[in-house]
Image (tube, rainbow, N blue to C red):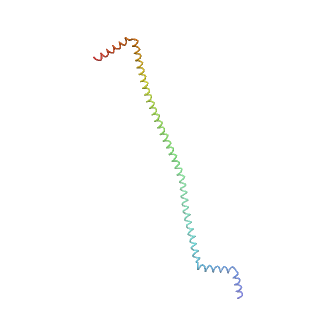
């Protein structure tokens, strides 16, 4: 039996089983000194914690995505509303400017007409004055010419004027 045992022992030493048992013994000794179980548990806990953080970040990201999608949906409506408001305001402003411009044009036309009327009156007054002045001058010249041609009329006018004065005094 010793021979079988020796043979078995030689076979065992040459096989992978010996290496495997030796490796297990090394791990057991290392585990006692290094505490692989605690290390594995710590790594496992860190992995679980990382997974939980990832899940929480995923939930937060999904919430943010939903909020962003809502914002985008509302943004399109807000943009349309702002464009409509801007268009409406621009139309109102253009209408107001047009109306104010029309009012200014009417005021200018009215002022122009007033100036024209005033100028017409001034020119008419000047023409009337000139015509009257020229008529008086012409009448004077006609009277002088008539008196030069008929000296007896001069005397007659003087006498008539004196008589008129006499009537006024009494």
Depth check: give the residue in front, 102 or 170. Answer: 170
Query: Is 33 rendered above or below residue 159?
Result: below
Is residue 167 found left or right of 42 in the rendered image? Answer: left
Q: Position of residue 155 (x, y in %)?
A: 35, 12
Q: Position of residue 50 (x, y in %)?
A: 56, 68
Based on the displayed image, in which of its 4 quarters is residue 107 positioned?
top left
> From the image, which quarter does the N terminus lie in?
bottom right
In this view, which residue lies farthest toward the left?
170
Based on the displayed image, in which of its 4 quarters is residue 117 positioned?
top left
Is residue 45 found left or right of 151 in the rendered image? Answer: right
Query: Is 60 rendered above or below residue 113?
Result: below
Is residue 57 found left or right of 147 in the rendered image? Answer: right
Query: Is 143 rendered above or below residue 34?
Result: above
Query: Is 75 rendered above or below residue 52?
Result: above
Q: Position of residue 164 (x, y in %)?
A: 32, 16
> From the image, which quarter does the C terminus lie in?
top left
Q: Position of residue 139 (x, y in %)?
A: 41, 18
Label tally: 0
Depth check: give the residue in front, 94 or 108. Answer: 108
Depth check: give the residue in front, 2 or 25. Answer: 25
């Amino acid at each position: 039996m010793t021979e079988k045992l020796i043979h078995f022992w030689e076979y065992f030493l040459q096989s992978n089983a010996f290496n495997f048992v030796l490796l297990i013994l090394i791990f057991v000794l290392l585990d006692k000194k290094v505490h692989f179980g605690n290390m594995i548990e710590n790594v496992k806990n860190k992995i679980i914690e990382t997974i939980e953080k990832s899940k929480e970040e995923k939930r937060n990201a999904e919430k943010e995505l939903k909020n962003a999608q809502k914002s985008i949906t509302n943004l399109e409506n807000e943009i349309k509303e702002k464009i409509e408001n801007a268009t409406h305001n621009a139309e109102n402003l253009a209408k107001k400017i047009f109306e104010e411009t029309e009012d200014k044009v009417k005021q200018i036309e009215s002022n122009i007409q007033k100036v024209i009327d005033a100028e017409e009156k001034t020119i008419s007054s000047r023409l009337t004055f000139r015509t009257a002045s020229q008529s008086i001058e012409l009448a004077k010249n006609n009277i002088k010419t008539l008196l030069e041609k008929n000296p007896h009329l001069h005397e007659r006018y003087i006498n008539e004027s004196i008589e008129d004065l006499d009537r006024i005094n009494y």
